Image: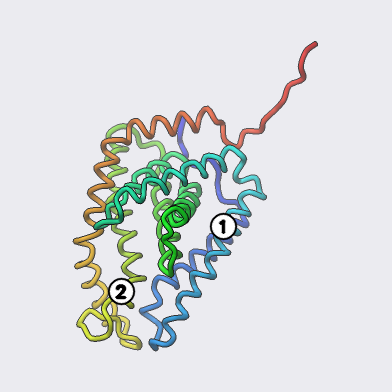
Amino acid sequence: MKYLTNDIYRFSGRSRIALAIVSATVFAGFTWPFYVQTQSSAHFAQYFFWAAVPASIFLLIAQLSDSGLDAKSVALLGTLAALLAALRPLGAGAVGLEPMWFLLILAARVFGSAFGFLLGVLGMLASALLTGGFGPWLTYQLFAAGLVGLFAGSFPARIKGRAEILLLVFIAILASLIFGLLMDLQFWPWALGGDTQLSYLPGAPIWENLNRFITFHFLSSMAWDIPRAVLTSTLIVITAPAVLSALRRTKTKAAFLTPVEFSARLK
């Protein structure tokens, strides 16, 4: 049966180890406000993400060296990453309106979670190169986008038709909220200073900081995450049938990971 699985390739053994290392360091980097005890120690949290960057590069290299990605897969990955980079500035980042997310979700849906993770990371990196959006927030954005791609590609491929569109809308809403939650985690400790009822308090009990963060996130999500979810869902409803069809034709005709054989020419 066609499309029982999305993946055009799967993570190799070495890649799974790299992904586990990346996931652990990224999780620590996002959640450090709940266990770092002093303000001076907070600056060391950035090192979690700088450690995750070479691990993610190793993840890509491991896929290439293990033939997890062939030349056609790399070309497709680069093309889609460039499209994501071109789409992202169209919303100017205003109130979370970034049209790149619908393409990331649809591509991950067709090509699988491993491809979606790499596409999210590379697409966000290409966007930063295009717009000059470099800063301490970039590493957070890279891995948040990678997790969105990983999540979007992890659902069963056998769901089709209207049910698939509804599933994609659900993924878009949840992915938008997940991305907003992760970005608020990196922004919250520095956003409010130390003089408000929502400020991060170094060394405070975890439940106190968690309560402050949840309130802060709820207020910010009304202005950023919900518009992002609405735009992404709307674009998916409008474009999903055509885009999914085009991507699936590409997947079928390109025959990813199928060895190229040359037959002897008859004289």
Task: Give SS at disc 2.
Answer: helix
- Which of the 4 image quadrants contains residue 201? bottom left
> Residue 57 location, x and y as percent?
58, 59
Instruction: Identify which residue, 205 or 107, lies in the foreground.
Output: 107
- Tell me the mark number nearer the camera, choosing from 2 and 1: 2
**With 109 as the anchor, is 99 left or right in this view?**
left
Task: Give SS at disc 1.
Answer: helix
For marks 2 and 1, the one nearer the N-term is: 1
Q: Is the residue under label 1 in contact with that under label 2 (CB below 8 Å)?
A: no
Q: Dot 2, how many residues are within 10 Å of its Cα: few (below 14), some (14-19), or many (20+)?
A: some
- Which of the 4 image quadrants contains residue 217? bottom left
Q: Amino acid at mark 1?
A: Arg
Whether residue 232 is visible here, answered yes or no, is yes
Q: Is residue 149 above or below residue 266?
A: below
Q: Which of the numbered marks, if any, corresponds to residue 16?
A: 1
> Residue 181 location, x and y as percent?
31, 64
Q: Residue at x 37, y 46 (%)?
A: 87
Q: Is residue 26 above or below residue 161?
A: below
Q: Residue at x 29, y 38 (%)?
A: 165
Instruction: Identify which residue, 96 or 32, lies in the foreground.
Output: 96
Residue at numbered disc 2: 188
> Residue 239 location, x and y as percent?
31, 35
Instruction: Identify which residue, 51 or 100, lies in the foreground.
Output: 100
